[in-house]
Amino acid sequence: MSWFRRAKPANPFAGSWACAGCGEVHQGMMDLAALAPDPWPHERIQEPNSAVRLDGDFLSEDFCVMSGRHFFVRAVLEIPVHGQAEKFGFGCWSTLSCANFEKYLDGFDNADFADWGPWTGWLCNQLETYIGADPEGVHVYPQPDRQRPTLRVVSPGHRLAIDQEQGISVERLWEMLRFYGHAPAKRG
């Protein structure tokens, strides 16, 4: 009797891969990021974080204020990928109330948040077919060591909330990357 051992499929994110969309060579799993909240009405020119102001319009790498009334923080929405040690990350923006935005600012440098949340917010970037033009409710979890907050979709029946809980296949991740112009030139 002979025994056959089924070979595990190769890790598609091991090593480097050439992108058919942008032509660049990427290392490992690729994350996506939005440079500003979708409603940001200006060019995406970022000021230093240290210049943050609560009046008018302001955009930095981590903070955004619109009209002195709408407050946003840059965050990460994570989705597990089956068979991968790391999660796919979507760098995106969430609203915060003025009070929670000020708490976040106060604790940003030393991660000493008076209230570690979760805080409520609205995801303000479209993510492929998951999120359309209307914002989606999220819980915002501040993180230590100047790491960006993580987000969890509030509505348990939303497709994105289900995928955050159950994970997605590598093929589904390739579809998402392809939607944004990134996909492997050759799959092997």
Image: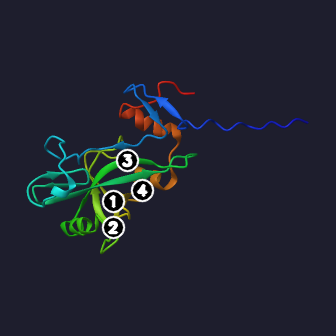
Q: Distance between the residues labelled 3 and 1?
A: 14 Å
Upstream in sequence: badge 1 or badge 2: 2
**Secondary structure under badge 2?**
loop
Where does residue 14 sit, x and y in percent of width and height?
55, 37
Give the number of the disc on residue 138.
Answer: 1
Between marks 1 and 4 in the image, the one whose residue lies nearer the viewer? 1
Indicate left or right for 48 with 3 as reference. left
Q: Residue furthest right?
A: 1
Q: What residue type is labelled 4?
A: Gly
Instruction: Give residue 120's quadrant in the image.
Output: bottom left
Relative to 110, say whether 52 is above or below.
above
Measured Cα–Cα span from mark 4 to mark 3: 20 Å
Instruction: Return the mark for residue 90.
Output: 3
Q: Do the residues labelled 4 and 3 touch (CB within 8 Å)?
A: no
| Mark nearer the N terminus (4 vs 3) | 3
Mark 4 — residue?
Answer: 157
> Which residue sits at x=16%, y=58%?
52
What residue is drawn where x is 44% and y is 34%? 26
Residue type at mark 3 is Phe
- Cα–Cα gap, marks 1 and 4: 13 Å
Image location of residue 185, percent across then percent down: 47, 24
